[in-house]
Amino acid sequence: MIIFLKLIVLYWAPARYMLYCVFTVIILHSCEDKTDDDHIVDYGLVINEINYNSSDNFNPNDWVEIYNNSSNTIDLGLWIIKDENDEHVFTIKSNTMIKSDQYIIFCRDTLKFTEFFPDVGSYYGDLGFGLSGNSDIVRLFDSNGSLVDIVEYDDNPPWPVAADGNGPTLELRHPTLDNLNSKSWSPSEGYGTPGALNSTYDGDL
């Protein structure tokens, strides 16, 4: 919003000249910055679980779980995962399908991930970048570059602090919850549930 305020003063002096003063005050109110989630394309895909800071005694390295909460099989080929840094880009390989009610894991280090989770089948990597152990953003884009989902987590309250280097992951309590809201997340039981229903899933929500 822009407001212009003008004050005009007219003054007649004996010498018959006029002093004409104009004071202009400009007040600028910029529009509130829009966040990425204002432009989300809804495929029904959800960033559902995040391991951003493993414990020392159980370290599969960073990983992110995507869940298909839609009734459709979706081709993730050439979709992109980023963190907060736009130069950190992982492009999903062509013909990567995610079925309805399926989970797919994207790992920083697939060898380390499978060492600790040998029974998880649907995983891809290596991401080529890691997630911050403090705060970061996880973003999923479709092949057209449109934002599909975004999570901005933190290692301080109100986010669950147990997920910061203590073993648990960040788990979304239900796939329909707003995953930008810290209250939608809980620390997992154990070391997380990659490729399976979250341990903190609340079916009553």
Image (cartoon, rainbow, N blue to C red):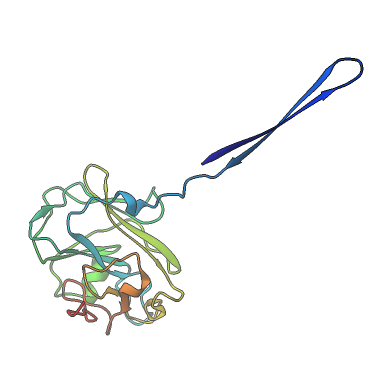
Please indicate, yes or no, whether residue 41 appears anywhere in the rendered image: yes
Decide which of 27, 190 is in the foreground and name it. Answer: 27
Q: Image quadrant of residue 154? A: bottom left
Q: Residue at x 28, y 74 (%)?
A: 171
Please indicate, yes or no, whether residue 169 appears anywhere in the rendered image: no
- Residue located farthest toward the right when viewing the structure as drawn: 14
17 with respect to 140 (left or right): right
Q: Residue at x 43, y 75 (%)?
A: 158
Q: Position of residue 182 (x, y in %)?
A: 37, 71
Q: Residue at x 24, y 81 (%)?
A: 200
From the viewer's perspective, is residue 103 above or below residue 33? below
- Residue located farthest toward the top when viewing the structure as drawn: 16
Q: Position of residue 26 (x, y in %)?
A: 62, 37
Decide which of 97, 114 is in the foreground and name it. Answer: 97
Q: Residue at x 17, y 54 (%)?
A: 43
Decide which of 131, 198 is in the foreground and name it. Answer: 198
197 with respect to 179 (left or right): left
